[in-house]
Image: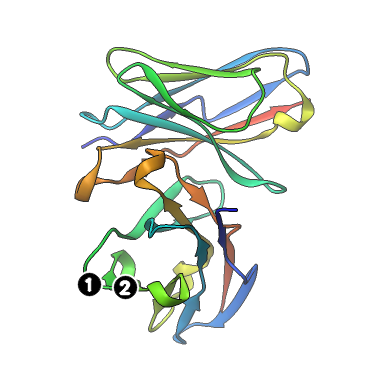
Amino acid sequence: AQSVTQPDIHITVSEGASLELRCNYSYGATPYLFWYVQSPGQGLQLLLKYFSGDTLVQGIKGFEAEFKRSQSSFNLRKPSVHWSDAAEYFCAVALKAAGNKLTFGGGTRVLVKP
Amino acid sequence: KAGVTQTPRYLIKTRGQQVTLSCSPISGHRSVSWYQQTPGQGLQFLFEYFSETQRNKGNFPGRFSGRQFSNSRSEMNVSTLELGDSALYLCASSSGTGESYGYTFGSGTRLTVV
């Protein structure tokens, strides 16, 4: 079955440390890939997206993600975390054949220690 | 450029009632999608409208319906509310396909059914 998995439900990281959030998908074809961030009580903000081409994608707020076809992964990274990065992060995929339908992973909640 | 606007932000309804939520997409966006977010089920796709036609539908009962107007504004209706319908309902608008593929989310409507 088609699915998106974020293995880590919670991650705690110290301010200034690096962050990596994992995302794996199970689809027959390479889907469009997205990372969104959600602050409490708010909607979703797009961090970055991958459609094709360069497998290392730069996004907003200093985030980047790397697409690895062989591992069906699209992991999100940030070299140095700020306290304002505390939020929930969602990986999402969309299949061109399925139209504008996003399928989301379960999310990873990031806590930042001072 | 104005973002995606959802109204109202908060709603409290009684079980058995019906509710209508509104979404105004980004100007020029013709696709509007709706998602339900709950702690137990995460983010789930409800349906998508494009040029006033429902183009895609998720696995929700017929109590959940929607429509889109000629100005691309969309409404979502839930009839015979159940306690389990309590959720954050998010609307997303999309600019189209190809490299312009993108989903911008509103801040959501928090529905509480009592």
Classify 10 Å Cα crowding around label 1: few (below 14), some (14-19), many (20 and above): few
Residue type, numbered disc 1 = Asp
- Is residue A105 shown above or below B48? below
Rounded to the nearest angstrom, the CA distance separating label 1 from label 2 is 17 Å
Report x, y in % for residue B67: 44, 15
Please name the residue that numbered disc 1 is placed on: A54
Q: Which mark is residue A62?
A: 2
Q: Disc 2 is attached to a residue of which chain? A: A
Determine the secondary structure under disc 1.
loop
The N terminus of chain B - image quarter: top left
- Is residue B92 shown above or below A16? above
Q: Is residue B47 visible?
A: yes
Report x, y in % for residue B4: 35, 34
Residue most extreme to the front: A28
Report x, y in % for residue A2: 55, 53
Task: Name the residue at 34% across, 16% down.
Answer: B52
Task: Name the residue at 48% across, 73% down.
Answer: A83
> In which image quadrant can residue A64 be found?
bottom left
Q: Is residue B105 visible?
A: no
Left or right of A94 in this view: A52: left
The residue lying toward the viewer, choosing from A21 and A68, is A68
The C terminus of chain B - image quarter: top right
The residue lying toward the viewer, choosing from A30 and B72, is A30
